[in-house]
Structure formats: C-alpha cells, structure tokens
Image (tube, rainbow, N blue to C red):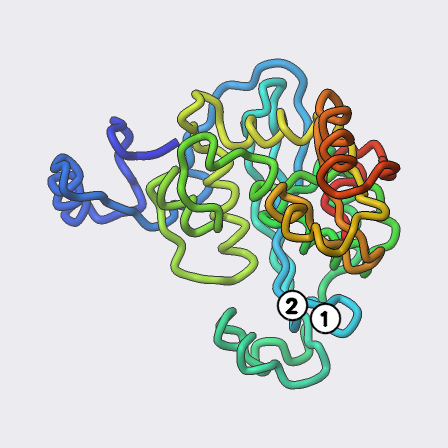
Amino acid sequence: MSFRGDDIVPQWLSPDTESAAALLEAHPDYRVLRSLPPLDLLPLPAPEGRLRTAAIIDTETTSLDPATGSIIELAICAVTFDGRGRIVGIGPVHDWLEDPGHPLPSEIVKLTGLCDQDLSGQRIDDARVVEMLSTADLIVAHNARFDATWIEQRYSSLAGQAWCCSLTDVDWRGLGYEGRQLGALLGEAAGFFNGRHRADSDVAALVALLTTTLSSGRTACSEMILSAQRPTVRIIAEGARFEVKDRLKARAYKWDQNIRRWGKEVTSNSVDEERAWLAEQAGCRNPSMRDITWYQRHRV
C-alpha cells in the first residue's frame, strides 16, 4: 500500500500541500514521502478465509541488556489478518509508560525523547499486556529477537508464544528493497515517514508497513507470515576450529554468546548441504541440530 500512483486522496494532509506534492511526485527527479497516516485511514482488503489475530508490539528500554535494564514504554496494536496473511482489521494502539526508578541515561533521552518527568509515577498495566499478548495467535515486532527477550523475561507466562519478525522474516533484499530498518522501509516501500522514535509511533509505522503491497504482489504481512510459518533447522557448529570463524561469518553463521558456539538456521532441504560444508570447511563433523518453528524462533 502506497499513495504513490494511487487514486486515494491522503485525507490527513492539507489539500494545498498535497497538490504541490502531487506535482513533484509526477516528475521522475523527485520522490515524495508523506507523514504517517492515522491507522483508520489505511485501505484494507476484504477478508478471505480464516481470520486470526496478531499483536504488533514495540518496547523502549533503558539499555540493551534485559538482565540490568527496564522497559520504560510498551505499545501494542491488535490486528486481524486473513487466510492470505493480509491485515484486514486494525485496533487502537495501546501505549504504557513505566518509571524505572532511576534517571534515564542521556542516550535514551536523546533516542526516545522521553525524560524522567514523563515517566515519574507511571506503571505498565501488566494484566492488560498479558491478556492482549496471550490471546493473540502471533506476536510481531521489528527485530523480534530484541523484544521477545524483554517480554519473556518480564512475563514468563508468555514464553512459547509464536513470534514473527518483520525485519528478518521478510526477504527485503531479495524483493528489491535496500533498507531493513523500519524507517527506511517505511519510506522506500510505503512512501511514508515517521517523525518520532517512540513505541506507539513505531507500532503505527509497522502496521502501515505490514499493510503495504510489495514488489512480489503480496503484502509485507503476507510475506512475513509465509516465511515465518515454515519450520527450519538450527545447526550449531560444535567443535568448529577457531581459525575458521571468518568462514562461518561469511556463510551467515552467528555467534551465540550464551552457548559460545556458532549457529545458523537453514531450511530442512539444506541440512545435508550445510553439514557437508561444515565438515569440509570448518572441521565440524558432528554439528548439533534442532527443529525450529515460530514458537522458538527469535529467542536469544
């Protein structure tokens, strides 16, 4: 979904400025980005097939480490998606702030725009959060590996929920998009910009991105779900020699600090090829393997 080349009039924008934008947009030397629209103005398709719900979430935190940091903002938007993986219904964005009990680091203030006064005395409604996330068929975040870790540490009852990641469960490069960060994709694929880095606005931006029809002819949400629902196999390069670490990195293996091993997810039909490569190139003849679905994926 993009307003470039469509007959849809952006109702949230001034007619005068939109006329000027349309004039520029018609010229090949210009590209126009519009401000993120209210979610109730996003055009949605008529539903087809089975309807399910997804909770689109974003967290703002005091650090990158859940063991020492705190969630200071949490936003959730419940959406309905159909049998083709398209968003066909959008609920309101719920947003909560929380006082971490200490002054915010200066870099967090700069990143989020939040300050100590904004958070003073605030508390996330944990019961409401658990209700919304536990009843969703999927939880979706942009960089789900980050958000899932924080959510499952705070809400242990939510461990084992199905997660999708709009960052890694869509082959953005393969579809012809250069960016992978939310703001870059929002502009390149949807033609919008988001002027705030807060949990509620990032959730709204992600919902808008997921409703966008991509170069494949499917929406970003459809692409994400098609990819995420496929089982994969996580291969751990047990016994790989230290001197082959650069080869492993070049083949998209990632270092897992918790188990201090190199690992990679592959499709089931690529397992034999990957095992052969590990034996020949990394001296790893007995890698450990684990089946992965969206109930385990994106966890640290």
| Residue closest to the eye, 8 or 252 | 252
Q: From where the camera sits, is residue 239 visible?
A: yes
Q: Is residue 106 above or below residue 225?
A: below
Q: Residue furthest top?
A: 49
Q: Is residue 88 above or below residue 104?
A: above
Q: Earlier in the sequence, mark 2 or mark 1?
A: 2
In-image side of 39 versus 79 (left or right): left
Numbered circle sitting on residue 70:
1
> Residue drawn at (53%, 77%), measured in percent from left and top?
109
Numbered circle sitting on residue 61:
2
| Amino acid type, mark 1 | Ser
Q: What x and y, as percent, mark residue 35?
A: 33, 50
Q: What x and y, as percent, mark residue 192?
A: 35, 46
In-image side of 130 versus 32 (left or right): right
Q: From where the camera sits, is residue 76 visible?
A: no
Q: Is residue 54 above or below residue 60?
A: above
Alpha carbon separation for disc pair 2 and 1: 6 Å
| Amino acid type, mark 2 | Thr
Quarter assignment of residue 152 = bottom right
